[in-house]
């Protein structure tokens, strides 16, 4: 069966319900999850259905909480593959629109539509928002404008525009809802601010970038777009050398940006959705997707607060040495919502984390929150973080999963040492 056939069955299931039916939407707490849930919500509203939407973290009692509700249908977006077996306890039909690794049996009341079941790489070629878009298009091809949100989800999940993702962006461009533009990745009101505030790429020891710029004969408070060709080339060459000294690969300073007819820069929208997810403002992210004009301004403030917190934590990480196991390295963070992004940035930009091993960030909450990142080369060599965390976490009474290159989980605090040892053994496999 093809993906298009699977989502057609799912859309038929929805359309078989009376319009007054209560449909529950559960999305995952990240940019992809918020975009995916919003796509489904907008498609349902256009089809005349009422819905109740929630953005949830992966947690052991998620299905137990839903058992108490009265719903005619529950649709999970970008979350659910690790709960399939438990879903048989739900007193209604369930549609799961997913792309994460799963290894559970599918109960009779569950329609599990996972990118990986249709020959798509769920880490690169289709994310939660991609599958949500496929479902929306099965409901009505007029939903092609939702390709804008799907692209924001793809960007948020750091996927490529290949596989089904390629079709989505082509749909959007073909119908005039998405535009491609080539531009520099560096942004900021001045060169000094641009370098000090940059997260992708992240520059170490740039608490004050003025001396660096003055050493190149460039005015610190000038703007990037005002530089002549010679000074611009000189700056980018110096920044490339700095990143190489940090142990990074060479970087492409220009890339393709996608703009949505209704949303503007979709990379910026994705960044705002991610910030809303991490700072417990998921409802604001949903409002932004539903094109609430006030939400865009509020989300910009949340985005800046989030980026500021990341910068502060990265400055602290610059001064620390990580803990090292045989097959991975790890560090602790005080703020669980920042764990994943800090693990990714540390792995990519901090010299002391360049040990050819996956990086794990641990944060103490009610449980220990775990976020992990690997590099493409590690995955090619056999590393699968999703499987390793799932097995190690479940062995100590926790939960986990994700992708080969990025994954997460939760384990009891008293099982920390046991989990780390189990994780080391899983990664050795």
Image: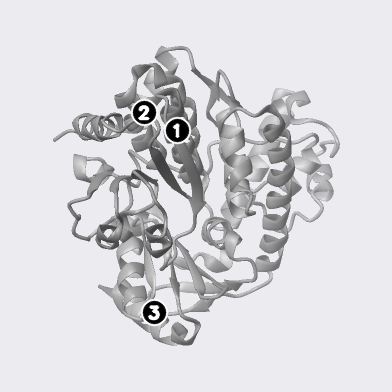
Q: Where is mark 3, residue-wise? A: 326
Q: Secondary structure at mark 2?
A: helix
Q: CA distance from mark 2 to mark 3?
A: 46 Å
Q: How many marks?
A: 3
Q: Residue at x 79, y 42 (%)?
A: 193
Q: Position of residue 200 (x, y in %)?
A: 60, 46
First reached walking from the N terminus: tag 1 or tag 3: 1
Residue 68 vs 334, above or below: the answer is above
Q: Specify whether residue 300 is in view.
A: yes
CB under 8 Å between discs 1 and 2: yes
Q: Nearer the viewer, residue 104 or 266?
A: 104
Res. 270 image quadrant:
top right
Quarter of the image containing the C terminus?
bottom left
Q: Where is mark 1, residue-wise? A: 39
Pick out the residue farthest to the left: 1
Residue 104 vs 145, above or below: the answer is below
Q: Is residue 42 left or right of residue 84?
A: right
Q: Secondary structure at mark 3?
A: loop
First reached walking from the N terminus: tag 1 or tag 2: 1
Q: Nearer the viewer, residue 304 or 85?
A: 85
Q: Secondary structure at mark 1?
A: helix
Mark nearer the viewer, 1 or 3: 1
Q: Where is mark 2, residue-wise? A: 136
Residue 337 vs 116, above or below: the answer is below
Residue 195: mark: none
Q: Residue at x 28, y 61 (%)?
A: 89
Q: Residue at x 79, y 30 (%)?
A: 223
Q: CA distance from mark 1 to mark 3?
A: 43 Å
């Amino acid at each position: 069966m093809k993906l298009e056939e699977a989502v057609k069955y799912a859309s038929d299931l929805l359309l078989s319900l009376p319009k007054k039916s209560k449909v529950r939407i559960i999305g995952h707490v990240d940019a992809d999850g918020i975009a995916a849930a919003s796509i489904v919500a907008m498609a349902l509203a256009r089809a005349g259905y009422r819905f109740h939407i929630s953005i949830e973290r992966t947690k052991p009692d998620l299905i137990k909480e839903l058992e108490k509700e009265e719903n005619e249908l529950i649709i999970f977006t970008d979350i659910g593959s690790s709960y399939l077996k438990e879903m048989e306890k739900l007193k209604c039909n369930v549609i799961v629109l997913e792309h994460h690794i799963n290894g559970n049996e599918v109960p009779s009341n569950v329609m599990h539509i996972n990118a990986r079941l249709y020959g798509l790489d769920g880490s690169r070629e289709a994310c939660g928002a991609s599958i949500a878009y496929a479902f929306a298009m099965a409901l009505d091809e007029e939903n092609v404008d939702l390709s804008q949100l799907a692209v924001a989800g793809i960007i948020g999940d750091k996927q490529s525009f290949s596989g089904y993702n390629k079709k989505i962006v082509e749909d959007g461009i073909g119908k005039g809802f998405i535009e491609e533009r080539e531009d520099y990745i560096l942004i900021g009101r001045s060169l000094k601010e641009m370098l000090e505030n940059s997260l992708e790429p992240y520059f170490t020891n740039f608490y004050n970038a003025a001396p660096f710029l003055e050493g190149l004969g460039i005015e610190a408070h000038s703007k990037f777009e005002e530089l002549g060709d010679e000074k611009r080339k000189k700056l980018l060459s110096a920044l490339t050398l700095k990143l190489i000294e940090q142990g990074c690969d060479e970087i492409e300073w220009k890339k393709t940006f996608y703009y949505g007819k209704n949303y503007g820069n979709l990379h910026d929208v994705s960044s705002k959705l991610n910030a809303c997810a991490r700072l417990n403002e998921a409802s604001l992210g949903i409002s932004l997707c539903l094109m609430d004009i006030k939400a865009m301004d509020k989300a910009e403030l949340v985005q800046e607060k989030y980026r500021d917190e990341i910068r502060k934590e990265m400055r602290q990480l610059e001064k620390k040495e990580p803990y090292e196991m045989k097959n991975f390295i790890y560090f602790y963070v005080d703020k669980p919502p920042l764990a994943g992004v800090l693990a990714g940035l540390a792995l990519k930009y901090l010299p002391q984390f360049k040990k050819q091993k996956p990086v794990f960030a641990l944060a103490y909450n009610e449980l220990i929150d775990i976020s992990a990142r690997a590099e493409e080369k590690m995955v090619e060599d056999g590393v699968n973080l999703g499987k390793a965390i799932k097995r190690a976490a479940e062995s100590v009474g926790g939960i986990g999963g994700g992708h080969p290159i990025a994954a997460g989980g939760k384990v009891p605090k008293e099982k920390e040492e046991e989990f780390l040892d189990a994780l080391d053994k899983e990664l050795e496999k």
